[in-house]
Image (cartoon, grey):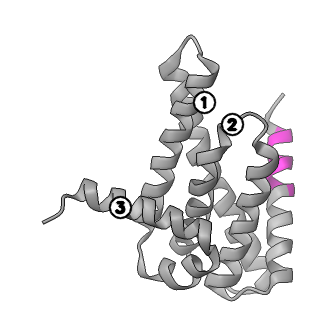
Amino acid sequence: MESIDTTFRSYYFSVQTRMLKDPRRVFSEHLPQQGVKRSLGVLLTSGITYSLACMLISRPEAYFVHGIVLLVNALGMVFIAAAIGYGLIGMITGRWVPFPRLLSIYALSSGITLLVAWLPFSLWFTEPWKWWLIGAGLTGSFAIKRSQAWVIIIGSIVILTLLFGAFLP
């Protein structure tokens, strides 16, 4: 009998590989079969990897605090973006989707991009890639029209930008 650690490790690498090869298939075929816990596990694992890689590059004085801030930011943004997306989906499509499944789309999309996000200047590549993956998840998992998915994505980005503008100095 395999241990849970080995099973999750193989799942993690399997889902990341499938996300690179054919993300639409992951969202349409594999996502409905898995629970939100596995997707959040992928996000947490990638978030920890991202935080550690960032700390190795930046070498902050307060390693622990810096690492926790990076991890909380990486995880928290997924929940905030998913909540905004959830509201926009309801407003734009007129129907509500299951939030745990939506959260899984955001978690897997962020989980794969966090593995590259620690590289300097990668933001210009990883953010569009993440939002494209989210759009693929919306159209593949919930049968949302592409035009609606684009409105949801652009609306999410605008709302996130306005929120940061309102709360940051």
Q: Residue at x 59, y 56 (%)?
A: 112
Residue at which label 2 appears: 119
Q: Which residues are magenta?
A: 158-166
Q: Is residue 79 visible?
A: no
Within 10 Å of disc 1 (Cα), the crowding (few <14, some 14-19, many 20+) is: some
**Magenta stretch, overall SS:** helix
Q: Which residue is mark 1?
A: 54
Q: Quadrant of the N terminus?
A: bottom left
As helix, strand or loop, the secondary structure at mark 1 comes to: helix
Residue 60, can we see it? yes
Query: Circle 3: is it few (<14), some (14-19), or many (20+) Cα within 10 Å?
Result: few
In the foreground, 7 or 146: 7
Amino acid residing under circle 2: Leu
| Numbered disc in front, either 1 or 2 | 2
> Where is residue 45 drawn, in percent x and y?
45, 48
In the image: residue 93, left or right of residue 54: right
Q: Find out whether residue 50 is within the magenta segment.
A: no
